[in-house]
C-alpha cells in the first residue's frame, strides 16, 4: 500500500453518515481515502450486515481499500469487566460504557498502526499527525466530535466542514442512486429508543427474541458490581424493566412528542458508535 501524507482513514460505522463519507470519497467528491475500516462486534442487525456487504462490494469496485475487523462477539463479551455494555441499572443510571473502546476504537487504531508499517501496539510510535482519521459526524450532532487521544492521529469531520446534517446525507445518497443504510447499532445496544425496539420487535422478531433472552440472561450477572456501581440488576431498556414487559408503545409516543420538530440524535457520545 502506498502511504500518503497524511494517511487518510475512515472509521466506518456502516451507518448513514460514515457511509456517505465513504461514497463521497469513492466518487471523487471529497479527498481520496487510503483505507476504510469497520469493526464487526459480532451482533449487528441483519439489515446493517446486508447494507455493509452491499457497500463493501460497491466501494471495492470503485477502487477503495476496505477492511472488516472481526473483534469478537459482543454477546459473550458484553458483561465482562472492562468491556461491558452501558447496561441500565436499578441503582439509577447506566454502567460506564466500555464496549466501543475495546471492540471498535482500539482494534481500529491497532490496525491503522499496522497499515502504516508499525507494530499494532509496541513502540516505537508513529510520528505526530501522520494519520488523519475521518468520522461521520454531522452538524446536528456536532457535540460528538472529539479530539484524538493519541499524537499520531488527527481527527477530521468532513461532514461538519460541509455543513451537512443527517437529512442532507440521505438526500445526497438518493441523488446518487445509492441505498440509504439503516442506523447501525448492536442488537443488544441499551441506547436504543423505544421506537427502535418496537421496530425490531415487529420487523425482525428473531432479533427481538434474542435481545429479550440476552436481557434476561444478564439481569443478575455476577459482573454487575464493578466500576464503583452498586447495581444488583442490569437492563437493556432504560426504564429498568424487562424488555418484554416494558410499555414501549407509551414510551414511543412520548418520544414522538419530544422529537416532533427535530431529528433525534443517537445516544452514544463517543464519536464512533452508530455512525
Image (tube, helix red, strand yellow):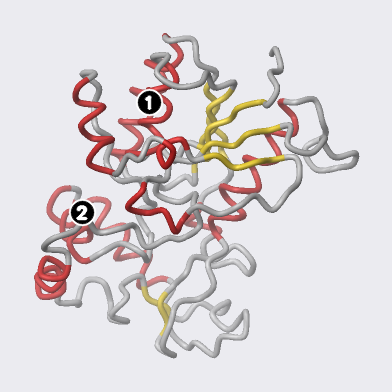
Q: CA distance from mark 1 to mark 2?
A: 20 Å
Q: Quadrant of residue 212?
A: bottom left
Pick the front one: 228 or 7: 7
Q: Where does the image place residue 162, in percent across and percent down from the top left?
A: 38, 35
Pick the front one: 203 or 265: 265
Q: Residues within 10 Å of mark 1 (few under 14, many from 20)?
A: few
**Is residue 216 positioned above or below 121 on the image?**
below
Mark 2, secondary structure of its residue: helix
Q: Quadrant of residue 198?
A: bottom left
**Is residue 54 positioned above or below 195 on the image?**
above
Q: Where does the image place residue 181, in percent across and percent down from the top left?
A: 28, 35
Q: Where does the image place residue 31, in percent across and percent down from the top left?
A: 51, 21
Q: Where does the image place residue 85, in percent across and percent down from the top left?
A: 49, 65
Q: Which residue is mark 1?
A: 53
**Is residue 253 positioned above or below 192 on the image?**
below
Q: Which residue is mark 2?
A: 200
**Is residue 200 positioned above or below 253 on the image?**
above
Amino acid at each position: 500500500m502506498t502511504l500518503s501524507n497524511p494517511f487518510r482513514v475512515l472509521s466506518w460505522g456502516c451507518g448513514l453518515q460514515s457511509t456517505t463519507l465513504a461514497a463521497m470519497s469513492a466518487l471523487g467528491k471529497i479527498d481520496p481515502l487510503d483505507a476504510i475500516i469497520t469493526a464487526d462486534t459480532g451482533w449487528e442487525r441483519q439489515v446493517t450486515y446486508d447494507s455493509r456487504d452491499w457497500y463493501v462490494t460497491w466501494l471495492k469496485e470503485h477502487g477503495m481499500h476496505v477492511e472488516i475487523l472481526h473483534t469478537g462477539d459482543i454477546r459473550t463479551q458484553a458483561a465482562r469487566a472492562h468491556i461491558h455494555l452501558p447496561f441500565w441499572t436499578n441503582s439509577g443510571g447506566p454502567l460506564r460504557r466500555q464496549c466501543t473502546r475495546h471492540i471498535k476504537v482500539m482494534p481500529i487504531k491497532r490496525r491503522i498502526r499496522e497499515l502504516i508499517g508499525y507494530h499494532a501496539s509496541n513502540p516505537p510510535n508513529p510520528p505526530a499527525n501522520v494519520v488523519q482519521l475521518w468520522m461521520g459526524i454531522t452538524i446536528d450532532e456536532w457535540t460528538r466530535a472529539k479530539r484524538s487521544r493519541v499524537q499520531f492521529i488527527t481527527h477530521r469531520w468532513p461532514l461538519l466542514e460541509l455543513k451537512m446534517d443527517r437529512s442532507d446525507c440521505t438526500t445526497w445518497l438518493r441523488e446518487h442512486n445509492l441505498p440509504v443504510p439503516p442506523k447501525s447499532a448492536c442488537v443488544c445496544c441499551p441506547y436504543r429508543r423505544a421506537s427502535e425496539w418496537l421496530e425490531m420487535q415487529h420487523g425482525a422478531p428473531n432479533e427481538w427474541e434474542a435481545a429479550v433472552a440476552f436481557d434476561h440472561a444478564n439481569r443478575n450477572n455476577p459482573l454487575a458490581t464493578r466500576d464503583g456501581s452498586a447495581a444488583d440488576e442490569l437492563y437493556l431498556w432504560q426504564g429498568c424493566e424487562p424488555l418484554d414487559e416494558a410499555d414501549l408503545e407509551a414510551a414511543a409516543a412520548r418520544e414522538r412528542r419530544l422529537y416532533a420538530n427535530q431529528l433525534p440524535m443517537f445516544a452514544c457520545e463517543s464519536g464512533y458508535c452508530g455512525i
